[in-house]
Amino acid sequence: MVWWLLLVVAGCAPGDARSVGALAGDCAGCHAEQAAALAGSGMGRAAGSAVFAALREEARTALGEGAATGCDACHAPAAGDGDGVGCVPCHAAIGDQGPHDGLVVLDLAGPVRGPTGVAHGAPHDTVQGHYLATSQLCGTCHDVNGPGGFVEAPFAHWQAGPADAGCADCHMGPVPGEPGAPEAGADHAFAGPDDAPEVATALLARAVSIDAATDGADLVVTVTNRSPGHRLPDGASFLRELRVRVDRDGDEVGSAWLSTRLTRDGVEVASPILADAQVDASIEPLGQLTLRFVGLAGARACVVFRRYRPDLLAHLGLDPALAGPEQVVACAG
């Protein structure tokens, strides 16, 4: 069975001295600010985390070398550099064989694809990259079709949803609207759940709201996905902890998961490699989820987030501190 395919390279040779392939290692010399932002982002570190390394090894052991190579197609592409995705997989992209599973097509022998096609005095040729500006390019790595519990579909959810904006409008650069943040898409920081806790939490806080009401002895909590972009949460939420936590007098007395849970034969498991199904509790774009906590009227409810689920880290034999501190996204009550 073919799981993931590697990036398809249309131009196998680097081309002349002004091609994107020939200059692939020199981007930071002229684009230092963008390169630094990318290197510090979750995408720039996509192959550098201990969690990725452990899951890749588990995939290789359980499913064979082809599965591990499939992980690299998006996390450590041959046309990338450093510990993750570099400049070339986006700026040499000319299309794809499907908006999923790493099926992007690159032209390394051609010019750099840029947002305007204008780069006066550049050492490389430049053309306007129409595909570069599409959310479909993002979908080539962020929609994933297996195996096991490794199923992600944020691009497909975005396509089916009501959003007018694209992926870059929310995720490219520091969280828009935060103090000192540039316009969306103005740099290459790619805000997401693997960023610093304050960045990930700020991104979530823009999308989620929570309300609480008393119904007799019960607490009724409504969580709203204010984003038109995709489900909340989405993507690889099975690796993460997003939940509603209910507290009374400083103690946790109730909880409900929003992150996707993983099962095998109906029994919950920690790793997507072990799973054969997902239990999805995510909220549709602009949708709501109502939860009832019996006997907890008057308690306080909060949406909380951690980068990784502690049970996943324990399964992988990793330091539980990698989960990061539990971040409060929004509260009610």
Image (cartoon, rainbow, N blue to C red):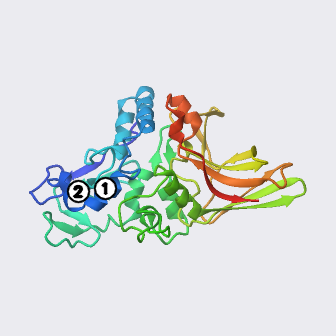
Q: Please state if 257 lies on the left or on the right of 219 as rendered.
A: left
Q: Position of residue 167 (x, y in %)?
A: 44, 63
Do residues under tags 1 and 2 come within 8 Å of each other at their CB atoms?
yes
Residue type pointed to by label 2 = Ala
The Cα atoms of the two marked residues, 1 and 2, are separated by: 8 Å
Image point (14%, 50%), residue name: 13
Q: Please state if 3 lies on the left or on the right of 18 as rendered.
A: right
Q: What crowding class fits label 2: few (fewer than 14 Cα within 10 Å), some (14-19), or many (20 or more)?
A: few
Q: Please state if 327 lies on the left or on the right of 155 as rendered.
A: right
Sequence order check, earlier mark of 1 and 2: 2
Relative to 246, say whether 189 is above or below.
below
For the residue labelled by badge 2, is the local secondary structure a helix, a strand or a loop? helix
The front one of 228 and 330 is: 330
Which quarter of the image is occupied by the N terminus? Answer: top left
Relative to 321, say whether 241 is above or below.
below
For the residue labelled by badge 1, is the local secondary structure a helix, a strand or a loop? helix
Give residue 137's quadrant in the image.
Answer: bottom left
Residue designated by label 2: 28
The front one of 249 and 122 is: 249
Relative to 47, say whether 10 is above or below.
below
Q: What crowding class fits label 1: few (fewer than 14 Cα within 10 Å), some (14-19), or many (20 or more)?
A: some
Q: Where is residue 222 in the image (x, y as percent from the top left)?
A: 73, 60
Q: Where is residue 281 in the image (x, y as percent from the top left)?
A: 65, 50
Q: Do we see residue 271 in this rendering?
A: no
Image point (9%, 57%), residue name: 17
Q: Please state if 103 lies on the left or on the right of 302 as rendered.
A: left
Residue type pointed to by label 1 = Ala
Which circle marks residue 36 in the picture?
1
Q: Do we see residue 191 in this rendering?
A: yes
Q: Where is residue 29 in the image (x, y as percent from the top left)?
A: 19, 58
